[in-house]
Image: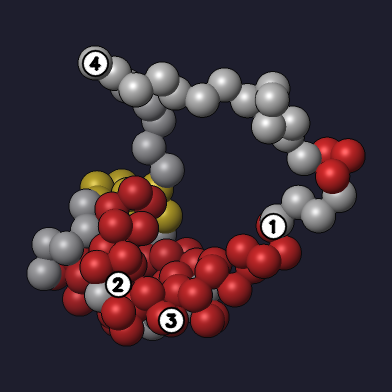
Amino acid sequence: MKDAIRLSVSEAARMFGVSPITIRRAIKDQEITYVVVQGRYKINFESLLRWSQRTTTVRNKRDESGIGQFVEQWKIRNKLFSPNPRGVKEDEPSS
């Protein structure tokens, strides 16, 4: 089993561009998964991402003031460091 990435309520709020109240509401409504560690919520990152994709308002906030605002900066512009398309194996369709 792979290690889960877990965030605190405040980290999740900053990363997704929403208020901590919004994250706590999602916890209360059981829209995201979490564990309690030493009395604090630790939220599963994958469930946060799925939750942020379901709601248009949250998706827009994520893209405008959360992690989505940095996507353009993450793109590789220098072709020297881009993966060679011939070197990347494509998945073969299963029969």
Does label 3 or label 1 sit earlier along the sequence?
Answer: 3
Q: Is residue 77 above or below residue 27?
A: above
Residue at mark 3 to residue at mark 4: CA–CA distance: 41 Å
Q: Which mark is residue 23?
A: 2
Residue at mark 3 to residue at mark 1: CA–CA distance: 19 Å
Please name whichever residue, 77 or 41, is drawn nearer the observer in this view of the structure.
77
Q: Residue at x 54, y 69 (%)?
A: 68
Q: Secondary structure at mark 3?
A: helix
Which residue does the numbered mark 3 point to in the structure image?
61
Q: Which one is in front in this view, the residue at disc 4 or the one at disc 2?
A: 4
Residue at mark 2 to residue at mark 3: CA–CA distance: 13 Å
Q: Quadrant of residue 56?
A: bottom left
Q: Quadrant of residue 22?
A: bottom left
Residue at mark 4 to residue at mark 1: CA–CA distance: 36 Å
Q: Quadrant of residue 59?
A: bottom left
Q: Amino acid at mark 1?
A: Trp
Which residue does the numbered mark 4 point to in the structure image?
95
Q: Position of residue 72 (x, y in %)?
A: 67, 66
Does label 4 or label 1 sit earlier along the sequence?
Answer: 1
Q: Secondary structure at mark 1?
A: helix
User: Mark 4, residues whose alpha carbon is within 10 Å: few (<14), some, or many (≥20)?
Assistant: few
Does label 4 or label 2 sit earlier along the sequence?
Answer: 2
Does label 2 or label 3 sit earlier along the sequence?
Answer: 2
Please name whichever residue, 36 or 57, is drawn nearer the observer in this view of the structure.
57
Does label 3 or label 4 sit earlier along the sequence?
Answer: 3
